[in-house]
């Protein structure tokens, strides 16, 4: 295959900062479908055969069939930190580097985690809707009482449990210190680091769930973490506690979460991600003890712009047959399949 419609195919429009880099460096084409949709598998299969590099979003499934459709595909640049939408094992076996955009969205995601936590605990959306609907007539002591986050009037200390203590988990921890919270963390991969970190206590997941007033999830999605939080885990949590998820939807068994919320097993939840996104489990949207967002954890103008720039730079490096700076499968560069593909 030697004839291509473009150097790089972009599965949906990205931030202008990234598009400007493309315009200077290569030929590219952007999928022209509706902004609130993405290309289906048939479209991806067709388009990947007519480009040298694929720039994808986390909403597109890049499976082996897609990867095998072009035996000269130089790489896949994913505009996201997570890359569970891509069959990385297949890509590696085929000699295809896969890149992501790590680090840049850490602080923005931590900010949104706290926004969700505060919103659900203090019932901010309900109070807003009450106000704009004209129902507010007079202040009253029973008007939308929520839960304290940090020190209450008697200086009771609340406990925050952080599941996953990577970049984002650590950023959430730094913010929690300002609320004078007791902080627990669970992440067996970095247990030693957590134990050496001042102001945070390592404990196993069951103990974290039992002791925390707020549980926030920041782990990668893999076979070990899928449905990490299910019925038994929810039953371990305090009835007054809240669950926050800005990581990946399938880490929580969403149907069991609906059960727990309906039956007041826990007090509430704040979600930015969903198990079968964009669908929600039946009954979730009708609950009044949840705050639900459309996967916007990284959605600040600056962060989305930097993510686009990073993804484009990765894509351009792949196009030039250079080792991309954010390759998630760096071992691919030493494989026979990679060298044959890049002849």
Image (spheres, grey):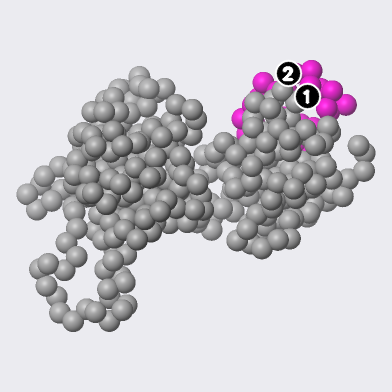
Q: Is residue 314 left or right of residue 122?
A: right
- Picture layout, residue 20 above or below residue 218: below
Quadrant where the image shows the N terminus: top right
Tell me if mark 1 has few (under 14), some (14-19) or many (20+) residues whose alpha carbon lies within 10 angstroms of its own: many
What x and y, as percent, mark residue 89? 65, 26
Quadrant where the image shows the C terminus: top right
Q: Is residue 15 left or right of residue 105?
A: right
Q: Which residues are magenta?
A: 318-343
- Picture layout, residue 49 above or below residue 200: below
Is residue 212 located in the magenta-colored stretch of the structure? no
Write down the residue under mark 2. 334
Is residue 337 located in the magenta-colored stretch of the structure? yes
What x and y, as percent, mark residue 90? 68, 27
What x and y, as percent, mark residue 100? 61, 38
Write down the residue under mark 1. 338
Tag 2 secondary structure: helix
Residue 214 in view: yes
Q: Quadrant of the rendered structure where residue 339 is?
A: top right
Residue at screen point 9% across, 53% down: 153
Q: Is residue 313 left or right of residue 169?
A: right
Residue 320 in view: no
Tag 1 secondary structure: helix
Q: Quadrant of the rendered structure where residue 13 is?
A: bottom right
Residue at screen point 63% across, 62% down: 35
Kindly indicate whether the residue at mark 2 contacts the one at mark 1 (C-beta within 8 angstroms).
Answer: yes
Q: Is residue 340 left or right of residue 125?
A: right
């Amino acid at each position: 295959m030697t004839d291509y419609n473009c150097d790089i195919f972009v599965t949906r429009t990205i931030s202008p900062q990234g598009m400007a880099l493309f315009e200077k460096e290569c030929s590219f084409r952007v999928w022209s479908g509706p902004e609130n949709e993405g290309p289906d598998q048939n479209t991806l299969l067709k388009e990947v055969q007519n480009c040298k590099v694929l720039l994808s979003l986390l909403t597109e499934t890049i499976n082996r069939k897609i990867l095998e459709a072009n035996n000269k595909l130089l790489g896949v640049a994913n505009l996201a930190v997570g890359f569970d939408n891509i069959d990385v094992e297949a890509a590696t076996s085929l000699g295809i580097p896969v890149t992501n955009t790590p680090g840049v969205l850490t602080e923005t995601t931590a900010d949104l985690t706290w926004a969700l936590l505060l919103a659900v605990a203090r019932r901010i959306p309900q109070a807003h809707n009450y106000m704009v609907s004209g129902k507010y007539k007079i202040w009253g002591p029973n008007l939308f009482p929520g839960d304290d986050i940090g020190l209450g009037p008697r200086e009771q200390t609340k406990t925050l449990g952080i599941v996953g203590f990577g970049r984002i988990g650590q950023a959430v921890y730094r913010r929690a210190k300002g609320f004078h919270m007791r902080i627990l963390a669970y992440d067996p991969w970095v247990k030693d680091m957590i134990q050496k970190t001042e102001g945070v206590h390592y404990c196993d997941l069951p103990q974290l769930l039992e002791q925390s007033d707020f549980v926030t999830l920041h782990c990668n999605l893999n076979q070990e973490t899928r449905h990490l939080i299910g019925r038994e885990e929810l039953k371990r949590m305090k009835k007054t506690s809240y669950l926050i998820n800005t990581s990946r939807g399938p880490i929580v068994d969403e149907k069991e979460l609906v059960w727990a919320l309906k039956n007041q097993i826990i007090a509430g939840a704040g979600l930015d991600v969903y198990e079968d996104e964009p669908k929600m489990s039946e009954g979730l949207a009708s609950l009044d003890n949840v705050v639900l967002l459309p996967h916007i954890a990284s959605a600040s103008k600056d962060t989305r712009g930097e993510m686009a720039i990073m993804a484009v730079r990765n894509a351009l490096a792949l196009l030039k047959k250079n080792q991309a700076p954010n390759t998630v499968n760096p071992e691919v560069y030493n494989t026979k399949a990679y060298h044959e593909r890049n002849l």
